[in-house]
Image (cartoon, rainbow, N blue to C red):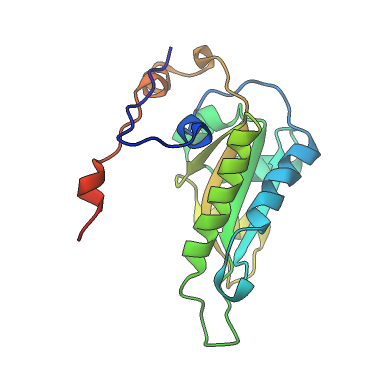
Amino acid sequence: MKQRPIYSYPIDEVIQKRWSPRAYAPTPLSDEQVLTLLEAARWAASCNNQQPWRFIWSHNDGSEKYQKLLACLADGNRAWAQHAPVLIMVLNYPPYKPCGPRNQWALYDLGLAVGNLTTQASLMDLYVHNMAGFDEAKVRELFEIDAEMSPVTMLTVGHLGDISILNDFNQKRELQVQVRKPLDELILF
């Protein structure tokens, strides 16, 4: 059984519940569940309402799109992510015409969108794992994305599963207690 982290101050249960599992149940998600998560992302705050996030997603259904997303992952992530019911590629699209050539806040805004998605997932008893371990060039090649877009992270989404589906290395990681730097280390002044 996974131990719960120790919080320095009281935070809401929905935030406490958030963590990034690697073991997912094979229970499929409905289109409505996935679109609800993306709707939560859509309503995130963004500079001048530019909404600089884009998504490519697929159910774990063996489709061509799913196979392409899975092929973009690094081997270590693919080993466990292949069991997740949903894969989502998150892309940054930072054009910002009204006030300048580029939206320098686009990645911040994208983070807010993924934060909304993740919080909505927690409310729905779903879990999200963000991954940086993917091949950006392969994403560009397989999906022929706009040159101004940048792949930022890949997400897995689903219900918690049995860790016995994982290799020994990932089973140990799954059982580790979440830790964070002390709050006083994060506050500068």
Q: Residue at x 64, y 69 (%)?
A: 146
Percent position of residue 83, x then y: 61, 26
126 up-or-down from 115: above or below: above
Q: Within the image, what quadrant is residue 28 found in?
A: top right
On the picture, is 7 further left or further right than 57?
Answer: left
Q: Residue at x 32, y 27 (%)?
A: 6
Percent position of residue 64, x then y: 74, 43
The quarter in which the C terminus is drawn is bottom left
Q: Residue at x 52, y 28 (%)?
A: 80
Residue 181 can be seen in this image: yes
On the picture, is 155 further left or further right than 67?
Answer: left
43 up-or-down from 171: above or below: below
Q: Residue at x 60, y 58 (%)?
A: 44
Query: What is the residue that sits farthest to the front in this orientation?
Result: 10
Count of marks, rendered view: 0
On the picture, is 152 further left or further right than 42?
Answer: left
Percent position of residue 45, x then y: 58, 63
Percent position of residue 18, x then y: 49, 34
The quarter in which the N terminus is drawn is top left
Residue 137 can be seen in this image: no
74 up-or-down from 141: above or below: above
Q: Nearer the viewer, residue 63 or 186?
A: 186
On the picture, is 61 further left or further right than 180?
Answer: right
Q: Within the image, what quadrant is residue 63 found in?
A: top right
